[in-house]
Amino acid sequence: MKEWLALIDENRIVRNRRYLRQHPELSEQEFTTADYIEKQLADIGVSFFRPVPTGVVALIDGGRPGKTLLIRADTDALPMQDDIDKPYRSVVKGVAHTCGHDAHTAMLLETARVLGQIKDDLCGKVI
């Protein structure tokens, strides 16, 4: 099995998190966020589907039989002003990812990318 830690791209995590931080959407309104997640998954070659308009499910089939592991992250933001003084501050007035969902989603996108690279070594499926 490949040394999976070496596959992690911290810069990609930061870029995804900062994009998501800048473009927050409230619960059940995460259409642009879902589009962004789909594009990232398509770019890394991980299959996915959208069971609801604001949700995306990625599917990684391991190379060997085994159990299924489900990992999830929320994508919604909060109805509040983003008061950080950073270039990746929310560009949406009155909506901010001050809850950490931007970070959770960015980390899960990178997890999907790494698992997609080592899928032949995995037993079972990851959803």
Image: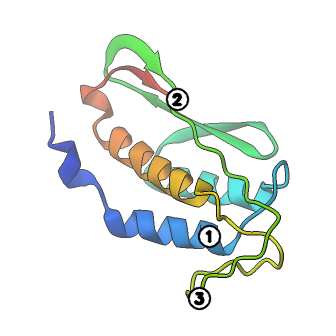
Judged by depth in the image, the label closer to the viewer, 1 or 3, is 3
The local crowd at label 1, few if under 14, some if 14 to 19, many if 20 or more residues have their Cα within 10 Å, is many
Please give the name of the residue rendered at 59% of the width and 59% of the height, measured from the top-left corner: 102
**How far apart in space, not on screen, are marks 1 and 3 (Cα)?**
13 Å
Q: Which residue is mark 1?
A: 21
User: Residue 26, position in %: x, y?
Assistant: 81, 58
Is 5 situated above or below 83? above
Please give the name of the residue rendered at 70% of the width and 58% of the height, measured from the top-left corner: 33
Secondary structure at numbered mark 1: helix
Is 9 situated above or below 124? below
Judged by depth in the image, the label closer to the viewer, 2 or 3, is 3
Closer to us: 80 or 26? 80
Hey, what amino acid is under mark 2?
Answer: Ile
Closer to us: 59 or 107? 107
Hey, what amino acid is under mark 1?
Answer: Arg
Q: Which residue is mark 2?
A: 127
Name which of mark 1 and mark 3 comes first in the sequence: 1
**How far apart in space, not on screen, are marks 2 and 3 (Cα)?**
36 Å
Q: Which residue is mark 3?
A: 85
Judged by depth in the image, the label closer to the viewer, 2 or 1, is 1
The local crowd at label 2, few if under 14, some if 14 to 19, many if 20 or more residues have their Cα within 10 Å, is some
User: Residue 38, position in %: x, y?
Assistant: 62, 52
- Position of 63 with respect to 125 (left or right) is left
Is 69 situated above or below 2? above
Secondary structure at numbered mark 3: loop
The local crowd at label 3, few if under 14, some if 14 to 19, many if 20 or more residues have their Cα within 10 Å, is few
Name which of mark 2 and mark 1 comes first in the sequence: 1
Hey, what amino acid is under mark 3?
Answer: Asp
